[in-house]
Amino acid sequence: MNEDIDYMAQQVLYNFGVMPTQFYETSMSDYVAAQRAKAPKDRPIDPLLLAQSAGLA
């Protein structure tokens, strides 16, 4: 597991320029949440808001 975290730190450094100290000081849950974030257009739409925007509610 430690090797996997070290490898992620290496990839983040190479691909995004994030220094290892920054990577290791950030919690893994924060990192995973950032990786899983979706653009607003890719997020699910609240059905009530959709109906309201269409003038149906």
Image: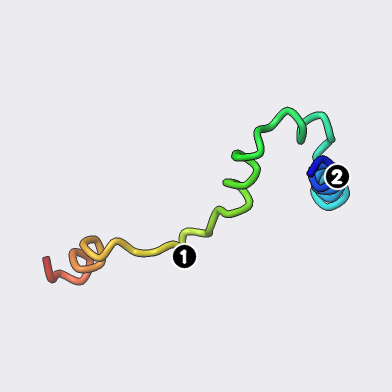
Amino acid on which disc 1 is placed: Lys
Quadrant of res 56: bottom left
Task: Find the distance from the CA under tag 2 to the CA under tag 1.
Answer: 35 Å
Amino acid on which disc 2 is placed: Glu
From the viewer's perspective, tell me whether residue 25 is left or right of residue 48. right
Q: What colour scheme governs how the chains and residues are painted in the rendered image of this protein?
A: rainbow
Q: Position of residue 3 (x, y in %)?
A: 86, 44
Name the residue located 78 percent from the left edge and 44 percent from the top edge: 1
From the viewer's perspective, tell me whether residue 34 is left or right of residue 40. right
Q: Name the residue beneath numbered marker 2.
A: 3
Q: Name the residue beneath numbered marker 1.
A: 41
Name the residue located 39 percent from the left edge and 64 percent from the top edge: 44
Q: Quadrant of the C terminus?
A: bottom left
Q: Position of residue 45 (x, y in %)?
A: 34, 64
6 and 11: which one is in front? Answer: 6
Badge 2 marks a residue whose secondary structure is helix
Precedes in sequence: disc 2 or disc 1: 2
Labels 2 and 1 touching (C-beta < 8 A): no
Farthest residue to the front: give it: 1
Badge 1 marks a residue whose secondary structure is helix
- Dot 2 alpha-carbon crowd within 10 angstroms: few under 14, some 14 to 19, many 20 or more: few
2 and 53: which one is in front? Answer: 2
The label on residue 10 is none
Quadrant of res 24: top right
Name the residue located 46 percent from the left edge and 65 percent from the top edge: 41
From the viewer's perspective, tell me whether residue 32 is left or right of residue 18. left
